[in-house]
Amino acid sequence: MVLDLVLIGVAITLGPLHNTAFILLLSAPGGVRKGLAFILAWLACLVAVIAAVILLTGGNPPTRNSNPSTAALALKLALGLGMVVYGEGKRRRDPKPRPAPKWMARLDGVSLWFAAALGFLLQPWAMVAAGGATVVQAHLSSIGSYLALMGYVLLATSSLLAMELYATFRPETAHVRLAALRSWVDGHQDQAIVALSLVIGLWLVGKSIYGLVG
């Protein structure tokens, strides 16, 4: 479980779309407060998914080859296949970088509530769902499971937290550095999406098949 959560957490935090939107929020007037609203909504979504899974399992992982265990593996397999198909399809399309969506240009004047809504809408939900399917294996009688879940949430939020702290304590240099980071992300967005989708998708497919036939 731990390795799966680490890989999924890294894939979530490196997603280019929400990072680009977050940089634009930080660059807007009141950007630090808007960034905080985004992060709180982001964290709330991750925690809510974990809490929902734990409520379903009661904090006890289902026995191997039981219906709940098989359903969780089947969900991870379906998500993995979807990521592989999406990533490969995107790789085969025109590789030239595309401009950021037009709606991102209008983030300067958004409210705190809208910033929070973006924290919900821009979640990479396929990855989050894969994380939720992995949390099925969490055993809450073990301190290791608690630490793994906390680490997963923090890892999945680490890029946002790093930029938020940087903009808070180094506002003079943050604007320039974050603008340069956004330019780099814009130029490599499609490659990042393809790589993350294929790597995590293939991992989920392989682990799920092994669990189903093992």
Image: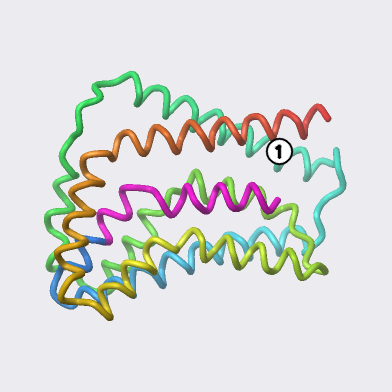
Q: How is the image coloured?
A: rainbow
Q: Position of residue 135 (x, y in %)?
A: 67, 55
Tag 1: residue type? Leu
Q: Position of residue 213 (x, y in %)?
A: 80, 27
- Quadrant placement of the C terminus: top right
Q: Main secondary structure of the magenta part?
A: helix
Q: Is residue 23 above or below residue 184?
A: below
Query: Image point 25% across, 56% down: which residue?
Result: 21
Residue in the foreground of this view, choosing between 178 and 54: 178
Determine the image quadrant of residue 162: bottom left
Q: Position of residue 122 (x, y in %)?
A: 36, 54
Query: Image point 18% across, 78% down: which residue?
Result: 30
Mark 1 Cα within 10 Å, few/some/many (few <14, many 20+)?
Answer: many
Q: How many marks?
A: 1
Query: Image point 49% across, 63% down: which residue?
Result: 45
Q: Residue furthest top?
A: 92
Q: Is residue 13 magenta?
A: yes
Q: Is residue 1 left or right of residue 162?
A: right
Which segment is the magenta one? 1-22
Query: Image point 43% across, 54% down: which residue?
Result: 13
Q: Is residue 103 above or below residue 148?
A: above
Where disc 1 sits, the SS reads: helix
Residue in the foreground of this view, choosing between 184 and 127: 184
Q: Look at mark 1 in the image and give the residue it sits on.
A: 73
Q: Is residue 59 magenta?
A: no
